[in-house]
Structures are given as C-alpha cells and as structure tokens.
Image: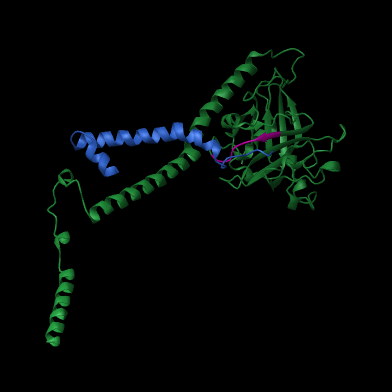
Chain colours: A green, B blue
Amino acid sequence: MGTADHHARGAGRISGDLNDLMPTTRFRPVPSPGPRSRPAFEPGPDRTRTIVRTVGEVLITLGMVVLLFVVYEVYITDLLSAGKQREATAQLDDRWHDEPAAGPERTDHFEGLGEGDGFAKMYIPAFGADFEFTIVEGTTAASLEVGPGHYPDTAYPGQPGNFSVAGHRVGKGAPFNDINLIQSCDAIVVETQYSWFTYRMVPLAEEKAGWAETKGKDPRCEGVGPLGGPYAELVGQEIVLPTNGGVIAPVPHQPGVTASSGEMASLMTLTTCHPRFSDKERLIVHAVLTEQLHKDPAKPDERPAALRETG
Amino acid sequence: MYGWIWRNLPGPTAVRVALAVVLGLGVAALLLFVVFPWLEPLLPFNNVTTD
C-alpha cells in the first residue's frame, strides 16, 4: 500500500515536471498580426521587451546627441565665428579707411574701445599667407567668438609692456589651433591703423643655453635672443595652470615688478587652452617686438619683410 | 519610441519617410542653434584665458 502510494506520488511528481517542461500556451506561436491588432494587455515578455527596447532607444539617442554636440563644437561654431570675424574685419577696414589718413595725426589711438570692437589684425606667416585674424577688445566669451581677444588691462600693440591676446584652440574659428607649432623667431605680425609691428617668439627654455651659437645666428633672430634683466626667466612657450594670471603681466610671472622705462620690453603674449578640448591648463606663447614700420601714405603697399616668411 | 513615432506618422510610406526626415532635421536644428549655444558656456571645454 505504502509502495503504491509512493509510486502514485512519484508518478504525479514526474507528470508535474513534465507539464512544466511541456510547451504551454505562453509559447504558442502568435499569428503575426499588425501591431495595432495586439490586445491592450500583454502579459509577460512582450511588455518587458517594449520597456527594454525603449530604454535602449533612449540611450542610443543620447549618444547621438553627444556626437552632435561634438560636431557643433568643432565645426558649427567655426561657421558661426567665421561670419562674425568677417563682419568685424569689414567694420575695422571701414573705420581705418574713413579716418583721416594724412597729416601729423598718424598715430594709433586705442582709447574708447568697446568690448568686442576690432582694433588690429594679426598674421602668423609661418602658418601660411592666409593666417589673418582681426583682434577684438576684451576676452569675454562673446568677444572670443569673434576672434582673438585682447586682455583689456594689458598694453596695446607696440607699447612697452605685454600686449596679451587670448584665442580659441578648438572651434569658434580656432585662431590658435596650431599655436603649439610656432617656433622661436617665427614672426607674429600685428597691423594697426598706422603701423606694422613684428613680434617674434623668444627662445624656448631648452634653446636658451647656447642660443648665440645655434639659432641666434639666423638673421631672422636678431633681437630675439634671451632678454636680460627682469626678463631672464622668459621662455617662448610654457604651459601653466588657468589661475596663473602672471603670464600676462608686463614682466611675465612677476606682477609686482615694473621694469624701468628704459629696459621695459614690448612683449606679446598669446594664451589658449591646453591640452586641446580641455580646461585643465593654458598654453602660453611669448614674443618680443623686433621691428616697427610706420605706414606711409605714399607707399600703401609697403609690408614688413616678415610677412613673406611663409612656411 | 521610434516604432511608436513611425506608427503614428500619417500617410503612405513615402510621406512617412519625408516626415521622419523633417522631424529629425528639426530636432538637430533645435539642438545645434538653441540648446547647444545655451549649454556650451556651462561646460568647461573652451576656456582660453588666465585669471
């Protein structure tokens, strides 16, 4: 009796197991009707599938939005900035053209410049004859979208002190995209209404020793060699933290020092972000004024020789 | 999500494709010319000045 019971229970268990293994109604193939004809209530996997698929689609969409943002940063802002730069250049050309071109008053004035007003053009011949940007006043985000921006409290072109300019390295016209490739003695030419100023990058830290015997012999490098006095520590390129505002001081890194007017050099400093796409550090380029050419109304096509040093 | 949009676009397939393209371009334009210009200054990618 006990044995029969046992068997019966055993058989029941086996049959139950088999029932579990057997295909049930859930697995019955659904005749494939159009999506609309599905019942409103879908128990089981279909509902789960819908949720998983939606989550997946949302994630893919977010990924595409991020990609689109990269496209925006690198290309679209270039287009927008190119238009603003063209406009600023046209305005500057108009102003230079309209103001009196003759007489004794042929000196540059930089007073009364408003934020975002163009006042000079810069050329880096080593980057090609077409490297030309109008420099605007101020370093706000809006000004830098137009072009390289002048730090308002620093010197103006040709003046003793440190003519300092910030520019974007990625997108927004990226005027300083390749600024790490500039070499010592390469010219940065600045054009104002009445003058041409040629700045040249000063020696890199590793070039300073033995400068006179090596690169210093290059005729282009005349007046570029290591500066003495308070400028002894000056190097052509450096990478600093964003908080290091001393790089645009009249004597870089020594904000308190004011060189006597006799030994005060006319420097130019460029600042941009480093590494590319990052806010972590700043790449700084220092140059020194080596040549100055007053525009002569009788010779409107006269250009400084450095403009022909195209690489 | 995309399936739902596709099912709810009216018209024959050709019209649906055209509408989908227009929708996609509209979203892209909204992002590029409204959302990203607003968003960008809030992100630390492009600061070039020293303080």
Give the position of the C terminus of chain A as an image quadrant.
top right
Tell me what residue is drawn at x 66 percent, y 20 percent: A300
Q: Is residue A197 magenta?
A: no
Name the residue nearer the viewer: A64 or A237: A64
Q: Position of residue B13 (x, y in %)?
A: 19, 38
Q: Position of residue A238 (x, y in %)?
A: 70, 47
Q: Which residues are magenta?
A: A164-170
Name the residue nearer the viewer: A182 or B7: B7
Q: Is residue A22 left or right of residue B6?
A: left
Q: Is residue A165 magenta?
A: yes
Give the position of the N terminus of chain A as an image quadrant.
bottom left
Q: Position of residue B9 (x, y in %)?
A: 23, 35
Name the residue nearer the viewer: B4 or A223: B4
Q: Is residue A185 left or right of residue A79?
A: right
Q: Using the image, determine if residue A123 lies above or below residue A236.
A: above
Q: Residue furthest front?
A: A1
Q: Is residue A4 left or right of residue A46?
A: left
Quadrant location of residue A131? Answer: top right
Q: Using the image, determine if residue A296 lies above or below residue A71.
A: above
Q: Position of residue A234 (x, y in %)?
A: 78, 44
Tell me what residue is drawn at x 41 percent, y 47 percent: A63
State the count of labels.
0
Q: Is residue A111 left or right of residue B35?
A: right
Tell me what residue is drawn at x 36 percent, y 46 percent: A58
Quadrant location of residue A19? Answer: bottom left
Q: Using the image, determine if residue A221 lies above or below residue A19.
A: above
